[in-house]
Amino acid sequence: MRLMLIAVVSSLLLVASTAASDDYEPHSAGHPLRIAAYVLHPVGVALDYLIFRPTHWIGSLGPLKAIFGHKDETPRISEPTRLSNPRNPDGTRETSQTP
């Protein structure tokens, strides 16, 4: 069993080929919007965690919930969802009944 494992591992190592990278082209790299995104993304994440998420949490508490109009958007997994159909508003599947 051990000899078989050694044979499999050595054959995988012999079959593996070397990886080559693409050539770097400085004239096509560094789009100005990508460079701006590198700078602005961490700022946006910091604003999200330091300002927007705490503000949303405070606005979702007790009496402030009614003032700001916060609605709990938790999905209810236990209740089945029904798609509305203009021809069949109760959401049940129609079966064709031939006389």
Image (cartoon, helix red, strand yellow):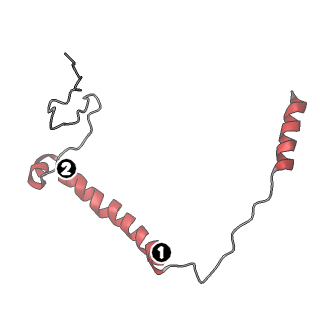
Q: Is residue 73 above or below residue 53?
A: above
Return the disc, 1 or 2, that comes first in the chain's sequence: 1
Quadrant where the image shows the C terminus: top left
Mark 1 or 2: in front is: 1
The secondary element bearing badge 2 is classed as: loop
Q: Are marks 1 and 2 in contact (CB under 8 Å)?
A: no
Who's the residue at 84% across and 37% down the image?
8
User: Residue 77 or 66: which is nearer the viewer?
Assistant: 77
Relative to the observer, which residue lies in front, 93 or 39? 93
> Which numbered circle lies on residue 5?
none
Amino acid under label 2?
Answer: Ser
Residue of label 1: 34
x and y, in percent, of residue 81 in the image? 25, 33
Residue at the outermost bottom position: 27
Quadrant location of residue 17? bottom right
Residue wearing tag 2: 60
The amino acid at mark 1 is Arg
Could you tell me residue 20's position as x and y percent? 74, 65
Q: Quadrant of the N terminus?
A: top right
Residue 10 appears in which quarter of the rendering? top right
> In this picture, is 9 found above or below 34?
above
Residue 88 in picture, x, y percent from top left: 16, 32
Name the residue located 27 percent from the left edge and 28 percent from the top edge.
Answer: 78
